[in-house]
Image: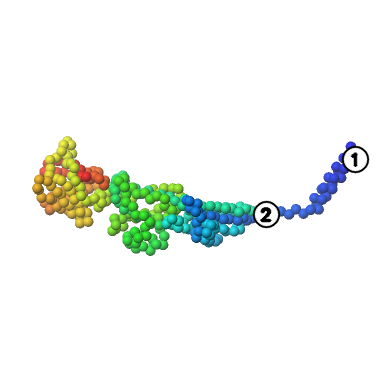
Amino acid sequence: MRKLLLFILIATVGFTTACKDEDLTVTLVENGNLQLTLVDNNDNLIADAKVTLYDESSELEELTTTENGLADFGKLNVGSYNAVVEATVNGKEYEFSKGMQVVAGATKQYEANIESYIGNISLQFRNTSSGNIAEVEGLQVALLRRNDAYYDAVNLSDYLTISIEDQTSNANGKVIFEDIPEGTYVLIYHDGEELINSSTVNVDKDDTEFLSFYINVVTAVLKTKSSWSISSVISQNDGSAVTNDYVSVTFDYENSDITLARSGGLSDVTGSFSAYSSSIYFYWDTLSSWSASVEEVSSGQLIIEYYDYNLGEPVVMTLN
C-alpha cells in the first residue's frame, strides 16, 4: 500500500512540472465572412443587382451580384451590417435594405427574395364638408416613385408618362395599389388635364398604407357624370309625389351650363350653375334662380332639396 501511494505521488509531481514548462497560446478571432444571395418568387437567382454594404456609420462597399445572384463581401469585422439592394425584377423596380450579422470565425450566408419586399396602398376619397366616405366612381389616381424622374417632371403630362400605375376609384370611392415594391411614392389625383391633389407615402414590406383625399364630392360627381334622369320629385312636408314635367338634367361642368329637359312637348330650360361641397346654385335664363341643398351624392345618385316657388313648399328631387 505504501509503495502504491508513493508511485501516485511521483506521477502527480511529474505531470505538474510538465505543465509548467509548456506555454499556452490563445488566438481570438474577431472577424468572419459575409455573403448575400438574391432570388425572386420562383427561386431564380438575380444577377446584376446593385448591393451596397454599410456599417453603423458609413458605406463600405458596392457590389453587383454575379450570375449566381451572389454578393460576397469577404472578411469583415464582427458586428452588424446593412445591405441596400437595388434591382429591377419582372418589370418592377426594387430598393430595400436588409440587416445582417457577422459572426466570429464563420461564414454567414443570407438569402433575400427581392419580390417579397412589397406592400399595398389603400386610398379612400372623402367628403370635404363631412369627412364621410365619398362614393364616387371613376376618379383618377396615378402612382409614381419619388425618384429623379419625378423631380424632373414639370406638369401632369410628365407625371403620367413616368407613372407606375394610373387607376380609377371604385363605387366606394376607393383606389387600391397592390404588391408595390418598398420605397417612397407620390399619389396624384387628377382629371386627365389638371393635377388636383397629391400626397407622399412610404411603402413597407408586408404592410398596407392607408390615406385619404378630401374632395368636393358634388364637383367630382358632376365632372364624371353629366346626364341625370329625374326619378322623383316629392314634397318634403308630407312625402307625396309632386306633379311636374321634369325629365332629366344635364350638367356641362366645363362651361357651367345646365339643361333641364321637360316632357309634353315643352321646351327645355337652359341656364348655368355653380357647385359647392353641399349645395348647387341654379340660374335659369335670368328669369329665376334658386339654390339646392345636396342631401346625398354618389356616382349613381344625386338627391337635392330646394324650395319650389310654384308649390310654395320645399321639395326633394332624386336624380339617377
**Quadrant location of the N terminus?**
top right
What amino acid type should be assigned to the residue bearing mark 2? Leu
How many numbered circles does the render carry?
2
Query: How far across and down, in percent of the image, does residue 130 sit?
Result: 29, 45
In the current view of this chain or complex, which residue is farthest to the top?
A: 238
Query: Badge 1, how many Cα within 10 Å: few under 14, some, many 20+?
Result: few
Left or right of 136 in this view: 62 = right
Determine if residue 59 is in view.
no
Residue at left offset 55%, top offset 61%: 60
Query: How far across and down, in percent of the image, does residue 157 sit?
Result: 32, 61
Q: Which residue is mark 2?
A: 28
- Of mark 1 and mark 2, the one earlier in the sequence is 1
Residue at left offset 18%, top offset 48%: 249
Determine if residue 185 is in view.
yes
What amino acid type should be assigned to the residue bearing mark 1? Lys
- Tell me the tag on residue 94: none
Separation of marks 1 and 2 at Cα, in angstroms: 46 Å
In this view of the protein, which residue sits in the foreground, 114 or 188? 114
Query: How far across and down, in percent of the image, does residue 277 sit?
Result: 26, 49
Residue at left offset 12%, top offset 50%: 268
In this view of the protein, which residue sits in the foreground, 301 or 216? 301
Q: Which residue is mark 1?
A: 3
